[in-house]
Amino acid sequence: MPTGTFGSTSYSNNSSGFAKRGVTFGLDAGIYVYKNLAIGLTVGFQDQGQLTQADVQNLANGYNSSFIKDQTSVTAINRYHNLTLMAGPQYSFLIKNFTIDVRADAGLLRSTNTPSLTVVFDYSANSGQSFYQLSSGAMAFAYGGSAGVRYALSDTWDVGLKFNYIDCSGIKIGNDGSNTGATGRFQTNLPITVFQPTLGMAIKF
């Protein structure tokens, strides 16, 4: 669930990500170092969708207005895919068969794919001009936290619901062709903020 500017569809905000709700899954571990205090580690994968036809039309209208062009075409390919590696202290509260886990963590977010755009101005005339927003494979620092509740099915198995928050100040976005930054939308940094509810099974050693 993208939040903040990551989920925004505003043409005028260069940080808008046009991200969508998507699937997330991963592996989560906790090593208890003292009673209910543990060091937690999470490796995750996120898919935040792709730009829709309405999104690219929104961008095309914005560029057309900014540059006062006769016609502007925007096409988008690729999806938002990223990996996260997060770790931090965790404290667990035991209430009968339930365990409540609270964690603060930090780590790295690695983009493996972002939507890439091709913008063409006045493509029906001889004065055609174009530029490209490239798919990013950048890495950046991220931080967040989580809270979850687990129910013990047996001495070794739990089923649990977890709510996770990840905030990354931004990954680098590359561009090729004309620099439209002085007039129109030109994205060089993409903040990523997501809220993730997940359901899973846990095994205890």
Image (cartoon, rainbow, N blue to C red):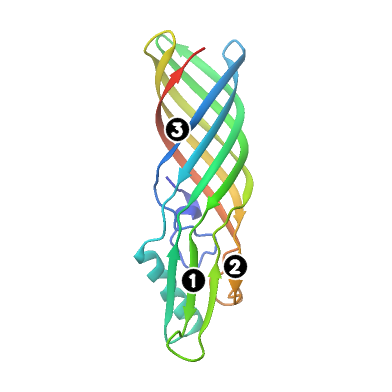
Label whose residue precedes the other's in the sequence (3 or 1): 1
Q: Nearer the viewer, mark 3 or mark 1?
A: 1
Q: Residues within 10 Å of mark 1 (few under 14, many from 20)?
A: some
Question: Secondary structure under badge 1?
Answer: strand
Label whose residue precedes the other's in the sequence (2 or 1): 1
Q: Is residue 137 depicted above or below 85 in this figure?
A: below
Q: Residues within 10 Å of mark 2 (few under 14, many from 20)?
A: some
Spatial CA span between label 2 and label 3? 35 Å
Amino acid at circle 1: Thr
Which percent across, then down, holds residue 153? 36, 12
Q: Is residue 49 depicted above or below 107 in this figure?
A: below
Spatial CA span between label 3 and label 1? 36 Å
On the image, numbered disc 1 is attached to which residue? 118
Query: Closest to the observer: 81 or 104?
Result: 81
Question: Secondary structure under badge 3?
Answer: strand
Q: Residue shown at 49%/14% (left/top)?
A: 204
On the image, numbered disc 3 is attached to which residue? 163
Query: Closest to the observer: 13 or 31?
Result: 31
On the image, numbered disc 2 is attached to which residue? 175
Left or right, residue 179 beside residue 19: right
Spatial CA span between label 2 and label 1? 10 Å
Question: Secondary structure under badge 2?
Answer: strand
Left or right, residue 72 beside residue 133: left
Q: Pick the quarter of the image with the N terminus.
A: top left
Amino acid at circle 2: Asn
Which percent across, then down, holds residue 171? 60, 53
Kindly check if marks 2 and 3 are in contact, taking CB atoms under 8 A apart as contact.
no
Amino acid at circle 3: Phe
